Amino acid sequence: MNKIISERSIELDLLLQDENLPRAINRLLDFVQDFSTNPQFVTNALQISADQRQLARSIEEQSLVNYQEIDQKNQQIAQRIADLKQKIIEVYQLAIQVHAQNTREHETTNVPTADAAFIPAKGAESFPPIMECYGLTKMYRKSGFTLANIDLQLRLGEITGVVGENGNGKTTLFKVITGNLQHDSGKIGFPLLQRAKHANGVNWIEVKSEIAYVEQELPSWYGTLKQNIQLELTQHGITGSQNERDAAYILERLGLTEHAQKKWSELSGGYKLRFALAKALVWKPKLLVIDEPLANLDVRSQRIVLNDMKDLAKSAKHPISIIISSQHLHEIESIADNLVFLQQGQMKFSGEKEDIGSDRQHNFFELSCKLDKQALDGLLTGLPVTEIEHNGLSYVITGTKELEGQKILQALLHQNVEIEYFRNISNSAKRLFL
């Protein structure tokens, strides 16, 4: 079995073992999109998702309270997920065999199942960058602010997180990348999006047709949520039954089906963002640019949105590159492959998130507790601590590389100190703000 589909199959099996049906259904929807073009399989997956939603609603409203019946219905849904997954795999494997045979014989065989599965040609890592820029600079002459000397590459299947305090150039960078703001100097190109050289360097008409931009301030719209999704598909040349199927899929995948007939004024901030993401993703762009999407979301909504973005970015069939800005560092770090830290318009760090702190000379820990600085300093005497600072919300403890978080916790818990928050930030983007 193909390595990618095998790994995804195992992932689904583990989710079913953990009885995590909502997550399993989301990944089933991704599975059918990635490894099948059979409309009936998509319909079946959507129906399983709808039935699970109805079951969850019945439990929440207490119209279904019999634990044995609930368990039985959950098992039935889990079995339907497993059965559909297996059918997709069987058709996929047959299509792979036919594809291999046709390749050997240099001819096309008209086998009905041959086009019912996706045959990946090559991994996203083998493609050129979606976007690359070198020495990119933009100056605002009235304010004097300058975004300077930005070197950056974006690739399919990768999420790049851009972090930094407000007013440090995140939105300026995004506007330049999306062609909504002209840079003053430096070079920018889109090797994967632009098929031929252009007299002006970038053929923005061609490039913009593959970029979706979700701005921080979401624009209002008229009509219903579903009408707007279908309009977006139509504007990208997707009509008829395919329009209906694609709209149904993205609405279900992003948890919007029950809100499909609502208008702008009837949606909460979280669902307005989900709509904006659905509108951006439904036509399968190559590059998704998202500016501060987490600002008005609660913690649970943040996690759902971030998981969805991670799953969709790494699609086997339609991988996309996502660049996202946020001040929610911990959340962005959890999904990002690469991080960019901007400070006063300068790129202070750019690279894989694992590289943060790789050359550090100290360890850094963040602590929140009710002790004053003098008392905390006294309790940590004997440990290789070099500095303790309070940033207004929590303490930042700096020590040599021999300082371990476990030793700090042991010293505090031994004195019955109530610890509200503790985190090793030695390899976190948060230490870049220190």
Image (cartoon, helix red, strand yellow):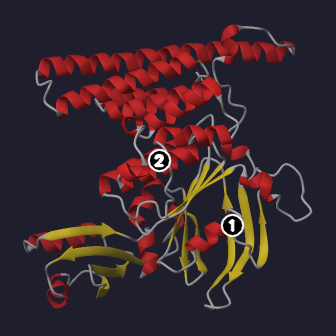
On residue 153, the disc is none
Pick whichever of labels 2 and 1 is earlier in the sequence: 1
Q: Is residue 282 visible?
A: yes
Residue 204 place in picture, x, y as percent: 78, 59
Mark-to-mark CA distance, 2 and 1: 22 Å
Residue 195 position (above or below residue 177): above
Q: Is residue 191 visible?
A: no
Q: Is residue 172 left or right of residue 326?
A: right
Residue 14 place in picture, x, y as percent: 37, 30
Mark 1 Cα-neighbour bin, 10 Å: few <14, some 14–19, many ≥20: few
Looking at the rendering, in which quadrant would you find the C terminus?
bottom left
Mark 2 Cα-neighbour bin, 10 Å: few <14, some 14–19, many ≥20: many
Residue 426 place in picture, x, y as percent: 40, 71
Which amino acid, by three-letter code, is at mark 2? Phe
Q: Residue at x 68, y 41 (%)?
A: 236
Q: Residue at x 13, y 30 (%)?
A: 62
Residue 298 place in picture, x, y as percent: 31, 58
Q: Is residue 334 left or right of residue 318?
A: left
66 or 3, which lies in front? 66
Residue 191 position (above or below residue 143): above
Give the image quarter of residue 424: bottom left
Residue sticking out furthest to the front: 222
Residue sticking out furthest to the left: 416
Question: What residue did someone put label 2 on?
Answer: 275
Which amino acid, by three-letter code, is at mark 1? Asn
Give the image quarter of residue 160: bottom right
Total number of numbered discs in the rendering: 2
On residue 180, the disc is 1
Tag 2 secondary structure: helix
Tag 1 secondary structure: loop
Looking at the rendering, in which quadrant would you find the N terminus?
top right
Give the image quarter of residue 202: bottom right
